[in-house]
Image (cartoon, rainbow, N blue to C red):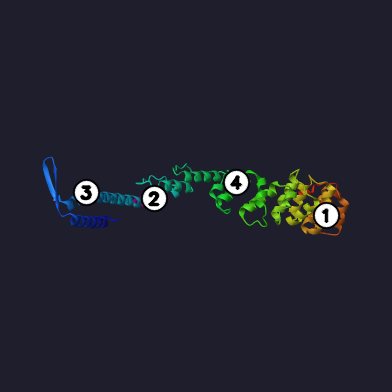
Amino acid sequence: MRLKHFIVYSLIYIGLVGIFAFVQNASSYKVSLLGVGLELPVALWFVLPIIIFAILAIFHVAWSGIANFRQKQAIKSDEDIYENYAKEILLGIESDKKFKTDTFKTSNEITKFLSPWHTHSVNIENEDISEIINVLEKLKKGEVVELKKYKLNNDNPLVTQNEFNKLQENSSYASEILKNKKTLDDELSKKAYEAALKTFSYFDIKKFPFEISKDDAFLLVERYAKEENFEMTKDDLLNLLIICDLDKYGYVNVAKSLNKKIEPDVLIALFNKLNSEKESASYAYLYLLYEFGMMEELKDILNYSDEYPEFEILMDLRDQGKNISANYFFR
């Protein structure tokens, strides 16, 4: 209520009470105190306490109004200060701004935390916000946190980051992320599938309904060549080699890497099949024939084709008693 309204309503109330008291008793009443007498109408004696309380109330309302006005002015000043403060924090400037009220105290600390240049700890008295800040700090550090109490949606960035952290902590968690997934339609699913390709057995990888890309296939072939316990059937390996769709040098390099894991006759048979599917694999097939000393088979092919000058040179040198590794041409 505004002060002037309070004064008007008080005067009306006092007037009504005085009139009512005067109508009921129009006589006077005398009060003596310490030998001093004061005689006033009964109606005035009746409203006098109300007048005193009204005056006190007016002073109280006026003082509260002045205090509220000063508070509003201070907050308005703090709003202007906060705008400049936020700019300085975001620009990485060590701000020395002082605020007149505590209104922006929590906002100041949150602004510090949200700054891209945030390096120092923040001091937030609000326990709920402080707890959230701690959760965010842990997520940034790659820690796994409990988020159930916040009832966040599955697509919330905090939930997504927490899932990333779980995946980073334990690659087997990829199975949980990819469960019931039909497509890799988000970044988390893609990361989970990438982790699965790098760590899961090929038997488990085949269970996923996702199409294997060239890069995926090449990664799996590399794992098969390097990891002793990573196994697959030769038909699966052939299919992956077809998907890789490499150039002649790429297939030669793959043949070199598989040389350490697969028996020569099996490896030659594998690349013979691959050669019938991929023309660019013919060099790898000839490379294996040469390296494993299958010269008759190699000569038969060269007799019917002039597309492999490198091997014709190698065979000519061999006929001259100079045995040179095919790696001379395929390093």
**Lower position in the chain sequence, tag 1 or tag 2:** 2
Between 8 and 141, the one nearer to me in the picture = 8
Say which residue label 2 marks: 82
The residue wearing badge 4 is 165
Q: What element carries label 2?
A: helix
Residue 80 at x, y percent in the picture:
36, 52
Horizontal and vertical percent position of residue 229: 76, 43
Give the number of callouts.
4
Q: What element carries label 1?
A: helix
At label 1, the amino acid type is Asn
Mark before the other along the chain sequence, 3 or 1: 3
Q: Residues within 10 Å of mark 3 (few under 14, many from 20)?
A: few
Task: Return the x and y of residue 274 as percentages of the image width and height.
Answer: 80, 56
- Measured in 3D between alpha carbons, the distance from the residue under mark 1 to the one under mark 2, in whole angstroms, is 74 Å
Q: Along the horizontal axis of the image, is 50 left or right of 188? A: left
Are dots 1 and 2 in contact, CB under 8 Å? no
Q: What residue type is labelled 4?
A: Asn
Residue found at the very far top of the displayed protein: 34
Reading the image, the residue beneath label 3 is 49
- Quarter holding residue 230: top right
Question: Which amino acid, mark 2?
Answer: Tyr
User: Which residue does the numbered mark 1 point to in the structure image?
Assistant: 272
Which residue is found at the position 61% from the left and 46% from the top? Answer: 166
- Check contact, mark 4 vs mark 2: CB within 8 A: no
Q: Is residue 85 magenta?
A: yes
- Nearer the viewer's eye, disc 3 or disc 1? 3
- Could one spot residue 91 in this view of the protein? no
- The stretch in magenta equals 77-87
